[in-house]
Image (cartoon, helix red, strand yellow):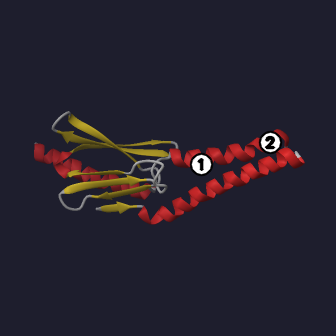
Amino acid sequence: MRLSNRNKASVYNSLSTLLLMIIVFGILVFIVNKYRFNILGIESYLLIIIPILMLIIFHLAGRQIFEYDSDGEALNFKNRNVVPFLSKPLHDEFPKYKLLKYDVISMFFIKRLYITVSSKNSGSTILKYQISYLTRKEVNDLKISLNKVVKANKEKKD
């Protein structure tokens, strides 16, 4: 099964650019208000604070682009940001038989995928992916696919 939200990259890039433009516009209006008109008073700080908070929430939600491929004998995970210099892209590929378990954690607007993979050195390794920008249907499809792999691995061990 293949799952990708790469086709939404332009939307996320536009949203990021729009938020930056709103911040710049808010700073300009704040400066003009502060030194020329002084109409808003202390509320003028909201012109800067609210857009910055929105941008922080956008980036705290995690990497926007998530790709998953379970076709063949390996599982392939990719997770990257639309703005390349903000965070290092993740790319992991490993055989299906190494998948031990997975967890999807949801807190408010943040969703994370934790994959536990068997490892020769330490016994197991936990891989972390940010899936906040996947739709509910995409998350459910991902869970179904991973459940199949985990179930098949348990049957092989027994």
Can residue 109 be seen here? The reply is no
Mark 2 is on which residue type? Answer: Glu
Please name the residue shown 45% across and 54% down the image: 84
Residues at marks 2 and 1 touching, judged by CB atoms closer than 8 Å? no
Please tell me whether mark 2 sits on a helix, a strand or a loop: helix
Label tally = 2
Up-down relation of residue 154 to residue 70 (above or below): above
Any mark on residue 82, and which? none
Can residue 79 be seen here? The reply is yes
* Residue corresponding to mark 2: 43
How crowded pointer 1 is (Cα within 10 Å; few <14, some 14-19, many 20+) is rated as some
Q: CA distance from mark 2 to mark 1?
A: 19 Å
Any mark on residue 55, and which? 1
Comparing 53 with 70, the one in front is: 53
Q: Quadrant of residue 120?
A: top left
Please name the residue shown 79% across and 44% down the image: 44
Mark 1 is on which residue type? Answer: Leu
Q: Quadrant of residue 14?
A: bottom right
The quarter in which the N terminus is drawn is: bottom left
In the shown orientation, is residue 15 left or right of residue 101? right
Where is residue 3 drawn, in percent x and y?
35, 61
Where is residue 71 drawn, in percent x and y?
23, 62
